[in-house]
Image (cartoon, rainbow, N blue to C red):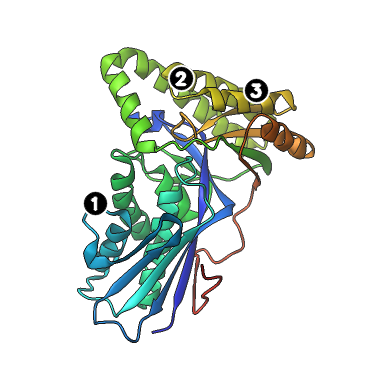
Amino acid sequence: MPAFTATAPGKIILFGEHAVVYGQPAIAVPVNQVQARATVTPNLWGAPGEVVIQAPEIGLMAVLDELGADDPLGAAVRGVMGALQVPRIPACTLKVSATIPFASGMGSGAAVSVAMIRALAGFLGQPIDDGTVCALAFEVEKIHHGTPSGIDNSVVTYRVPVFFQKGLPLETFSIGKAFTLVIGDTGVRSPTRETVAAVRARWQADPAGYERLFAAIGSITRTARDAIRGGYPTRLGPLMDENHALLQMMGVSSEELDNLVRGAKSAGAWGAKLSGGGCGGNMVASCDPQRALEVQGALEKAGAVRTILTQVGARPDDDPTGGQPGDLGPQL
């Protein structure tokens, strides 16, 4: 069997984080400037069924049989085996790498899962459709996050902007005019599982109050979708500011995030907010493309350890499956 490589992009949530877990909509977009990459190569000297998983960035090198049921990398492999009804995989090595910041709200876990699922299925000569990839990645997301919304695996799988509401069909939508985002990383790790659990505890203590916050965020998200469809990106700024204020009320912002939001606004961003689980991780600002470098510089001065410029527009021209047989790419 030839080697097979697959990639998957990062993602950023524009609106609706946390509220999406409670039935409200959220908007997320792929960030193609950062990627997860998985490569499966045959191991001619390995024992039948021996799958070696390598993830140098987290110091992992293990045989599949050594990984427990709660290991996300092992779960991704077993999910493919179950979906394809393959009881034993030819001896191989599955290597994973990523340029997506870890535990920062950019979908690193989902991207790694999607890349692994597609690479392994391609290696086995049985490519999996997007719907199945998304469903398998969602099962792995449960290990990462406990009660995931499903938005990460959806936007990463389909590689397009999505309007997501739990329990309803995934909705992609057209963009009336491309718009520019600047993402700032606080450098503070923010495991989504923990922040989601904290919000759940607060919701249980004050369900009426938190339902009002969730509903307000849902309204903002719907208005933002209309603005994006209509080609009015300047309208996103005030909506971002409103959404951030509501997330502050939920207790999921932080001093680092608020500093970056203020820095972006001081440099002329139309609006800015935390993105993802909060309490660290990333924030995102919308701005005039002519001011993007200025906003980027302001974020760095305000303490961002990393910034990413991205333009949200048409679907990228690359292979929608994110995979190529025999393309080993750079090896770490």
Instruction: Identify residue for label 3.
Output: 262
Name the residue: 58% across, 45% down. 174
Q: Nearer the viewer, residue 127 or 53?
A: 53
Q: Is residue 126 visible?
A: no
Sort mark 2 into few (<14), some (14-19) or many (20+) by Cα contacts within 10 Å: some
Residue 101 or residue 180, whichever sits in front: 101
- Label number found at residue 40: none
Q: CA distance from mark 1 to mark 2?
A: 36 Å
Mark in the foreground, 2 or 3: 3
Q: Is residue 251 among the parts visible in the rendering?
A: yes
Q: Say which element carries label 3.
A: helix
Which structural element holds mark 2? helix
Instruction: Please name the amino acid that badge 2 sits on.
Output: Ala
Residue positioned most to the front = 59
> Could you give the CA–CA distance between mark 2 and mark 3, rounded to whole angstroms?
22 Å
Task: Residue lying at the far bottom in this picture: please name it.
Answer: 44
Q: Amino acid at mark 1?
A: Asp
The residue where tag 2 is placed is 216
Residue 308 at what x, y percent from top left?
64, 44
* Residue 70, disc: 1
Is mark 2 in CB contact (under 8 Å) with mark 3?
Answer: no
Q: Quadrant of residue 90?
A: bottom left
